Each structure stands twice: as structure tokens, then as C-alpha cells.
Image (tube, rainbow, N blue to C red):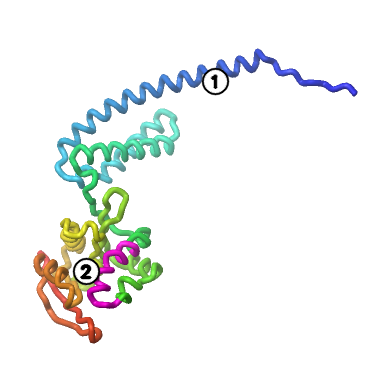
Amino acid sequence: MLILLRMEDPSAEDASLVALRNVRAEIDRVDRQLVQEIAEREIWVRAAGKLKAMAPAVRDPDRVEHVVAQVRGIAAELGADGDVVERTYRSMIAAFLDLELGQQGFLDAPVIVPLTVADAGEVLTLQRAAYASEAQLYANPALPALVQTLPALVEELASSLGQKALRGSRLVGAVRSVIDGNTLHIGRLTVAPDMQGSGLGTALLAAAEAAAGPDVTSAAVFTGHLSTDNLRFYERHGYVEERREQVNPRVTLVHLRKTLP
């Protein structure tokens, strides 16, 4: 039997390898140019960071979207893939953001942004950790915040206002509120146990009040009668006891109200 062996043309293979090496050399050349441009961009980012006094000024979502829209326009002019350019720039902006925050000492400083339904799982974990001390205080492991289900929380978030505090990518605080007429009803102001006493609760409360809008003239909250730290916290921020409501032999809710400017 005659077996025919297919012989490869070594010269064609060598030409392909040479071409690939040439292409990679050009990519390396472009990479060096890109890094040079990134290094120059870093100089200006650092200069801008020195002019920003607060973390919210560093975290500027409107500026990010402006830059992304701008580079997508440039990509269209040059015939580049807009999606690749956008993804590259978003990653680069995130890295430069960390650089600015670190330069200003804000890298670990929490930032407060709107709460969304997508945060439900993290919020549920947070409130269960934060309310453990309340369960001990009232000798009741079945407090509403501890037994709330994820579907119930999703439904609640879908119909309420909310703010969350992020430290890096970690959710460390949250607050929800509902507007009824001219009153803002604030509930579940929650701070991670290791962040309590850091001023984060004050920042979240202020954010909730500020998000109410000009037509809201007062804010209302309630807490349990044994939660003396909570009562002092709200009173310190201008809330005045309005009434008490006994919900069972062990728990009396203290309702407080504050006039908003």
C-alpha cells in the first residue's frame, strides 16, 4: 500500500512566524507609546487631585460619563471599536480614581450614593449584622430587621428612597425613607458594627434628609425605648420626641420628628 505524506512548505511557515513577530513588535511599539501617554495623564490627574478637597469631588460620575462619551467620539472619528475604547477607559479611570483617593487620603473613606434594588442582598446582610445588638437588648431574635426576607426587602427598596455608604466596594451603611405628603419617614438607618461611632450614621441621615426635596417640611423616625444610643443620636440631630407607642409588653416605640429647613 502506498502512503502519501503531505509535506509542509518550511519557507511558508517561516514567513508566517516572521510576520507574527513583526506584528507583535508593532504592538510593543504602540504599547510603549500608550504607557508614555498614560504617564503624562497621571501627571495631570495628580495635579487635578490636589485641587479637590473632598472625596465626592474626586468621585465625579458626570465627569466620568463626559470623558467616556468624548473618547467614544474620538474612536468613531478614527475608526476604532467604541466598546473596546470605552471598556479600556472605564478601567483606566477607575485605576486613576484610586490613585487620586489615595493621594488625598480618601481611599478608605466611605462615599454615599443612591441605594438600588440590586443592593438588596448586601443590605440584608448588613442589617442582620447591625441589628444583632438590638436583638440582645430586647431579648428578641425575631426583630423585623432580622427576619425580613430578601423578596420583602426587594419590594421595599423598589418603592422607597435610599442611600448607601460604600468603603471601597464594601457596603458599610444604608438608610431608607418614604415620603408621605410633606413628611419624610426615615427607617432602617444601619451602619456596619465596625464603622459605628465613625460619623457615618450622621452622614447617612443628612443624605436622607437632603434627598427629600423642597416640598418636604419634616422628617420622622422611630426607635425602641431601650435603644438609648439611638435616641441620643436622633435628639442630637434635632429630632424631638412626639409620642410613644407600645407594640408589645417588651417594646415601646418612640416616635420623633424634626422640622426640615
Mark 2: amino acid: Ile
Mark 1: amino acid: Leu
Quarter location, residue 112: bottom left
Q: Is residue 39 magenta?
A: no
Q: Is residue 128 magenta?
A: yes
Quadrant including the C terminus = bottom left
The span picked out in magenta is 124-140
Q: Main secondary structure of the magenta part?
A: helix
Image check: 13 left or right of 136?
A: right
Q: Which residue is mark 1?
A: 20
N-terminal of the pair, mark 1 or mark 2, is: 1
Asked whether 20 or 195 is in front, the reply is 195
Residue at left offset 60%, top offset 15% = 15
Q: Secondary structure at mark 1?
A: helix
Q: Which residue is mark 2?
A: 186
Quarter location, residue 222: bottom left
Q: Is residue 121 above or below residue 19?
A: below
